[in-house]
Amino acid sequence: MITGTPKPIEEILEMVDPYDRIVVAGCYGCVTVCRVGGEKEVQVLSSTLRLARETAGKKITIKEVCLERQCDPEYIEQMRSYVHDYQAVLSIACGAGIQFLAEKYTTTPLLPGINTGFLGVTERQGEWAERCQGCGDCVLHLTGGICPVTRCAKSLFHGPCGGSVQGHCEVGKDTPCGWQLIIDRLKALDQMDNYTKLKPYKGWNTSRDGGPRRIVREDMI
């Protein structure tokens, strides 16, 4: 799940200040799950903007919408019939959704209403934790299903480092050592032989050659 946090309302008000007709667009995907960009959040944000503008003596017209997903063309196409009647779109989807809207509606300013976070999981109600950086070279089969890139504060491919003390990371007592988690998991699975099979350190620059990554499934085209 892609996580996010709301931008401060002061920042949003500054972004929308030049406009008096906007669309506030939410998404029923990941941002609804982490409660920053769904239908309810669209309504609350729109009401807040209307109240703030009324207090400032400035009118604003807001169209409230929530798309199934802002990262799929068939859903954002639904905005075509009305998007050009407004001066800007304030999107509270993730950064990918906002950029995709900008690609489709090139003459309409797109404004981000949230700060996109990380790929994570719901540990408990109202709490999310990072689990994946989308590095494109998964080694979870060798590390007991625990990611060294994300769970190790230094993203080490061979660990633990000298900063690990009694299973805790040197960055904080509440942060478990990622490599201690991996070792404990490998022992529980009787797979400690995988500890010696780790790949060489990642070539981060090489993995990003060619700009944004792309996946093509010929069988789906």
Image (tube, rainbow, N blue to C red):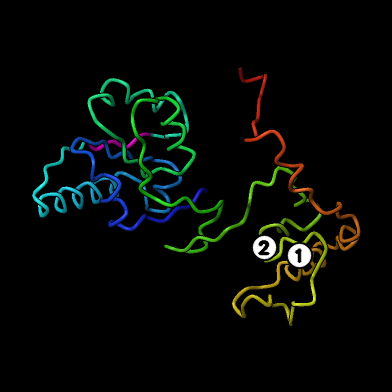
Left or right, residue 78 beside residue 132: left
**Where residue 12 sits: x, y (%)?**
30, 51
Magenta-colored stretch includes residue 64:
yes
Residue 76 position (above or below residue 165): above
Disc 2 crowd, CA 10 A, few/some/many (<14, 14-19, 20+): many
Establish if 99 lies above or below 79: below
The part of the chain drawn in magenta is 63-67
Callout 2 amino acid: Arg
Question: Which percent across, then down, holds residue 154?
Answer: 71, 65
Where does the C terminus fall, quadrant-wise? top right
Residue 144: name its quadrant: bottom right
* Picture coordinates of residue 33, whole percent (x, y): 42, 50
- Please state which amino acid type lies under the numbered disc 1: Ile
At x 86%, y 52%, the residue is 200
Which residue, given by chain and number where applicable, does mark 2 sit on?
A: 151
| Residue occupying the point 39% across, 47% down | 32
Residue identified by numbered label 1: 182
